[in-house]
Image (spheres, coloured by chain):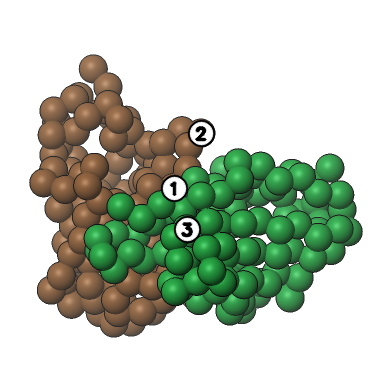
Amino acid sequence: SYVLTQPPSVSVTPGMTAWITCGGNHIGSKSVHWYQQRPGLAPVLVMYYNSDRPSGIPERFSGSNSGNTATLTISRVEAADEADYYCQVWDLESDHVIFGGGTKLTVL
Amino acid sequence: QVEMVESGGGVVQPGGSLRLACAASGFTFKNFGLHWVRQAPGKGLEWLSFIKYDGGEAFYADSVKGRFTVSRDNSKETLYLQMSSLRVEDSGLYYCAKDGEAFVSRFDHWGRGILVTVSS
């Protein structure tokens, strides 16, 4: 079935930009959604349909999707952004929701 | 605002059964698809099941197909997950989540989760 590949970890200095990638075969033809999960809390939707931000999510968060890679970009990273981030798609061929393995964002 | 509250978790022996419920409020329940997602301790998110807005169609992950059954009662605004033939590897935090649409798209609201422990 369809596989989404994320780097296990990304580290960034406060104020800099973090790029979290999500790789999948022809993922650019799918709609990708992103979730932030802070320790001990439920996931929160931070990006949907590749690049749409839900209300309440800062403009520092943006998304893109093309070819075999979708990317969540967090600009001007803050300590509060430290969390696990998951990408997600709906795989029509298998009728399965697929999550990436998650990326732990560490703010140094 | 949207609220989703899971219940029914607990400790069960391997081979046993458990029924989870998810009470929802703050939105027009009958118009949206709903999901169950679990997370084993220290692990990532694992999608388990989806049920369409009218209950007319449901999908399951391979890991639970044939053992878990999702259902919904739109009059009670409640989602259910009947789990049987439980295995140790089914242990984890179980979340219910609202889809942003009637069919499958994104999970726009999540419950806080309920713990299920399968152990002898």
> SS at mark 2?
loop
**What x and y, as percent, mark residue B116?**
32, 36
**What x and y, as percent, mark residue B38?**
37, 46
Q: Residues within 10 Å of mark 1 (few under 14, many from 20)?
A: many
Taking the image as drawn, is residue A48 in sight? no
The residue under label 2 is: B42
In the rendered image, the residue lying farthest to the top is B120
Query: To which chain does the residue with label 1 belong?
Result: B
Amino acid beneath label 2:
Gly
Closest to the camera, between mark 3 and mark 1, is: 3
A87 horizontally vs A16: left or right: left
> SS at mark 1?
strand
Q: CA distance from mark 2 to mark 1?
A: 10 Å
Q: Which chain is green?
A: A
Q: CA distance from mark 3 to mark 2?
A: 24 Å
Q: Which chain is brown?
A: B
Taking the image as drawn, is residue B16 in sight? yes
The residue under label 3 is: A24
The residue under label 1 is: B45
**What x and y, as percent, mark residue A95?**
25, 63
